[in-house]
């Protein structure tokens, strides 16, 4: 620690702090424009100049100058104020004065500083900037006439996002921020530059001219998309979400958001939201009152339970409290047929981790990632599924010199990061790579084997997974594989990342077990600062597992339920916050189930393809219209808060489930989410220590920052090799979408409006295909047509198609395999 004096106040701070940091500690405000707490010190604007006695009163930037013992600092004096006011005059020489029509008005740092310094005139004259406004994309407007060259956008895009869209070009008075070749902005559209721009140079176009900041009501909640659990601040006006506000003071994400979190809110306001219950009469779904819809649903479910039973399928975007009510409803109905998210994709957590480590969750927390020495990412898609975690990985590389190893069948954002090494394997062989890495650690004596169970059998099972054999099988360089394994074993702090979700159903359990085996041998589980992370696709994927929204006893899982329904062996299905026809593998099987089941109830935001086949449809509320908690992929329980009222007569999932349970004779009621959360603690011991009302802005992490394994059991795993074919298709998530909800959001749709099939340039040349051409893709006895997207990231013979668009029919062809053998033609 270092002791210093600032404006007569004694301060004790870390030796890594700057003068600016130290001043904030004691409530002294030093004006800044270029400083942002998530960025490295820069010192461009010169507003933060202060005097240090030991430097003979010389003016130095507070944001870049580290503190030293005994330092005496003056932050305000006549000389300092004069210099700051002169800096302001220089900035305003060419700066356009269009504050009345600038959307930043009322929260513009330059405007605030000009008022603070009393800048009502200027001693200097110059021509005002007259640069063209960049409006080439639908989400971000760039008006460089307002730019103050603070460099925040340049730095956040590089240091945090890892994309590098911006840079300084030209020199002197001609200097400006621009993209490559000064073209229009075409990037990931995460909006980080929008958040950090201190003036009106970079603005969100969907919010343009909608409101002034003082008119907006701000509500802090949790993003409803992926399992990262980012805090989002809803900007609400007239019961409508108009924007997502920047807030880096709360939440685990430090204000970072991806395109979905920042621009994907519009589905909440969508005009096609369901607003009234529907009941099928004479073959048509017609609007009815709630009491009638609940009565019809209750009678149908009761009759089914007296026959061949009821199956309940849920999505993973319900709150923990709603999951609790759903489990109670299943008990009321008397069914063990309860499952979520397709029933297979989460088995890496519920079975793979459970069998190896004795836990059903990630063992570390996201902030620990930034201090890791080595990070192993399984699949390059991890950035697409969990972009904000990807940003943390980027920061670990750039600030901590972390080594990133990516095991993947295609290149992606992760593989482009500095010092990233890619073990580029043939599709479907990731499991073999992990097994080979485990064998390297054992054969070279690098493994930490004390206390490991099943070691001898595990060694025997790995006999065929020599680096040389696996290299020949997968195309990965054997020496690179060995060196990557050694680096993982030699790291003091390390992490392994694996995402799961509906498009990653195949080998879910096996991949997680193989990753856990490798983690055990590398000493990762239970070690402070290290972790094995399995991150779910949906906002409350972890909560669904924690609360046991899984088949119990002899209960059927999702796939078994659908198969049984299609065979006439299940009389009713209750589907909540899920669209299996659009998103589950094997669409034909799902459609057959919905067509043949005797009775079905669907609860959703929209009249989805699945809802269209239902007998009763309940209109549900979005994440922005409810209270409760989500548990993210790092076991962090966070408050979800209501920002707006539901449209029409739509109700929260919890309210619907409670009302239906009441119709079925369950009179158990709870007085709000806090009471339900307390009940959850009785069933889930990990939640028992927390009080709902005491969950703060950072949430609470069950199991602590580092979750210790309760067993250390090596599990032998293998997988079938993909069928031989000239072309193989893999599916997964795209950066701009999450599940099927985002296809109703105008922001993501503006960037990625439809499905496509991606192929490498070599394959495109061989097939005579250009961007946008229609391609016929045939496999599993089905042929579909998709627009071609030609890129450099796919190896020869591999195709990729995102699964989000149900109307594309991809899941007619994809049936849950790791890789689909296909033929391709124009």
Image (spheres, rainbow, N blue to C red):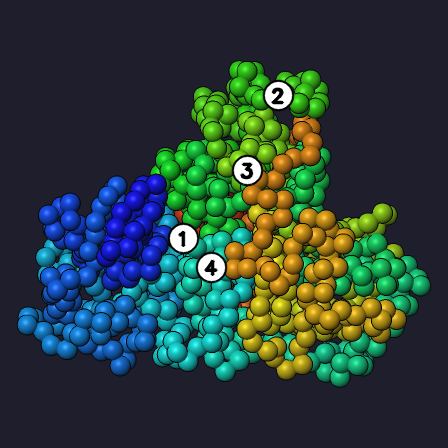
CA neighbours of label 4 inside 10 A, class few (<14), some (14 to 19), many (20+): some
Looking at the image, is mark 3 or mark 4 earlier in the sequence? 4
Position above or below: 257 against 158: below
**Quadrant where the image shows the N terminus:** top left
Looking at the image, is mark 1 or mark 3 earlier in the sequence? 3
Residue 311 image offset from top left, x and y in percent: 81, 59
Mark pair 4, 2: CA separation: 41 Å
Depth-wise, is mark 1 or mark 4 nearer the camera? 4
CA neighbours of label 3 inside 10 A, class few (<14), some (14 to 19), many (20+): many
Depth-wise, is mark 3 or mark 4 nearer the camera? 4
Q: Secondary structure at mark 4?
A: loop
Q: Are marks 1 and 4 in contact (CB under 8 Å)?
A: no
Q: Which mark is residue 531?
A: 3
Looking at the image, is mark 2 or mark 3 earlier in the sequence? 2
Q: Which residue is mark 1?
A: 770
How many numbered dots are placed on residues in this image?
4
Q: Which residue is mark 4?
A: 250
Looking at the image, is mark 4 or mark 2 earlier in the sequence? 4
Mark pair 3, 4: CA separation: 23 Å
């Amino acid at each position: 620690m270092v002791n210093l004096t600032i404006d007569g106040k004694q301060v004790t701070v870390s030796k890594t702090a700057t003068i600016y940091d130290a001043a904030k500690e004691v409530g002294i405000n030093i004006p800044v424009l270029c400083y942002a707490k998530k960025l490295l010190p820069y010192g461009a604007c010169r507003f933060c100049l202060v005097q240090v006695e030991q430097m003979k009163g010389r003016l130095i930037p507070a944001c870049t100058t580290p503190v030293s013992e005994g330092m005496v600092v003056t932050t305000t004096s006549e000389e300092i104020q004069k210099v700051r006011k002169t800096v302001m005059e220089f900035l305003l020489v060419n700066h356009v004065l269009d504050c009345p029509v600038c959307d930043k008005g009322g929260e513009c740092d330059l405007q605030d500083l000009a008022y603070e310094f009393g800048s009502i005139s200027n001693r200097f004259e110059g021509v005002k900037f007259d640069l063209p406004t960049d409006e080439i994309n639908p989400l971000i407007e760039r008006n460089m006439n307002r730019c103050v060259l603070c460099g925040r956008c340049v730095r956040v895009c590089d240091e945090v996002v890892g994309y590098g869209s911006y840079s300084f070009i030209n020199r002197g008075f001609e200097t400006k921020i621009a993209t490559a070749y000064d073209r229009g902005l075409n990037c990931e559209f995460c909006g980080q530059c929008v958040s950090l721009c201190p003036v009106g140079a970079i603005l969100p176009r969907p919010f343009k001219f909608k409101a002034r900041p003082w008119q907006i009501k701000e509500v802090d909640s949790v993003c409803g998309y992926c399992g990262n659990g980012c805090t989002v601040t809803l900007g609400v006006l007239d019961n409508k979400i108009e924007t997502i506000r920047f807030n880096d003071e709360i939440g685990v994400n430090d204000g970072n958001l991806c395109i979905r979190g920042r621009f994907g809110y519009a589905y909440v306001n969508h005009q096609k939201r369901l607003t009234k219950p529907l009941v099928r009469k004479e073959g048509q779904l017609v609007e009815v009152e709630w009491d009638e819809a609940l009565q019809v649903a209750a009678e149908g479910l009761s009759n089914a339970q007296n026959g061949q039973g009821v199956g309940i399928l849920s999505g993973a975007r319900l709150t923990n409290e709603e999951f609790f009510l759903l489990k109670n409803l299943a008990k009321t109905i008397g069914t063990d047929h309860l499952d979520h998210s397709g029933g297979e994709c989460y088995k890496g957590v519920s079975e793979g981790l459970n069998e190896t480590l004795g836990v059903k969750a990630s063992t570390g927390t996201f902030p620990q990632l930034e201090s890791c020495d080595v990070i192993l990412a399984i699949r390059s898609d991890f950035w697409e599924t969990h972009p904000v975690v990807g940003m943390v990985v980027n920061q670990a590389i750039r600030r901590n010199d972390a080594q990133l190893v990516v095991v993947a069948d295609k290149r992606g954002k992760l593989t482009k990061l500095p010092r990233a090494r890619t073990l580029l394997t043939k599709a479907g062989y990731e499991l073999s790579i992990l097994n080979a890495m485990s064998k390297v650690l054992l054969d070279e004596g690098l493994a930490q084997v004390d206390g490991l169970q099943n070691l001898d059998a595990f060694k025997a099972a790995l006999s065929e997974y020599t680096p040389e054999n696996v290299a020949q099988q997968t195309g990965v360089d054997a020496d690179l594989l060995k060196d990557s394994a050694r680096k993982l074993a030699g790291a003091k702090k390390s992490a392994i990342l694996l995402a799961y979700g509906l498009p990653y159903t195949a080998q879910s359990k096996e991949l997680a077990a193989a990753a856990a085996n490798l983690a055990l041998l590398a000493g990762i589980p239970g070690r402070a600062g290290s972790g094995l992370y399995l991150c779910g696709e949906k906002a409350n994927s972890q909560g669904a597992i924690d609360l046991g929204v899984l088949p119990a006893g002899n209960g059927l899982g999702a796939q078994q339920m659908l198969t049984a329904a299609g065979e006439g062996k299940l009389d009713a299905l209750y589907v909540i916050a899920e669209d299996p026809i659009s998103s589950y593998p094997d669409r034909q099987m799902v459609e057959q189930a919905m067509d043949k089941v005797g009775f079905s109830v669907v609860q959703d935001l929209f009249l989805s393809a699945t809802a269209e086949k239902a007998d009763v449809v309940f209109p549900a509320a979005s994440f922005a219209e409810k209270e409760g908690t989500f548990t993210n992929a790092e076991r962090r329980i966070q408050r979800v808060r209501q920002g707006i009222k539901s449209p029409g007569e739509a109700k929260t999932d919890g309210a619907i489930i409670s009302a239906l349970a009441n119709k079925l004779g369950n009179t158990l009621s709870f007085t709000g989410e806090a009471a339900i959360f307390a009940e959850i603690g009785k069933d889930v011991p990990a939640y028992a220590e927390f009080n709902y009302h005491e969950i703060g802005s950072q949430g609470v992490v069950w199991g602590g920052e580092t979750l210790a394994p309760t067993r250390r059991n090596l599990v032998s795993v293998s997988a079938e090799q993909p069928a031989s074919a000239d072309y193989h298709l893999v599916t997964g998530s795209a950066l701009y979408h999450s599940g099927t909800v985002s296809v109703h959001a105008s922001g993501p749709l503006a960037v990625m409006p439809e499905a496509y099939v991606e192929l490498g340039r070599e394959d495109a040349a061989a097939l005579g295909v250009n961007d946008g051409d229609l391609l016929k893709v045939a496999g599993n006895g089905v042929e579909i047509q998709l627009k071609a997207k030609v890129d450099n990231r796919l190896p020869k013979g591999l195709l990729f198609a995102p699964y989000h668009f149900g109307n594309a029919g991809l899941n007619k062809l994809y049936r849950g395999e790791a890789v689909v053998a296909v033929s391709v033609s124009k």
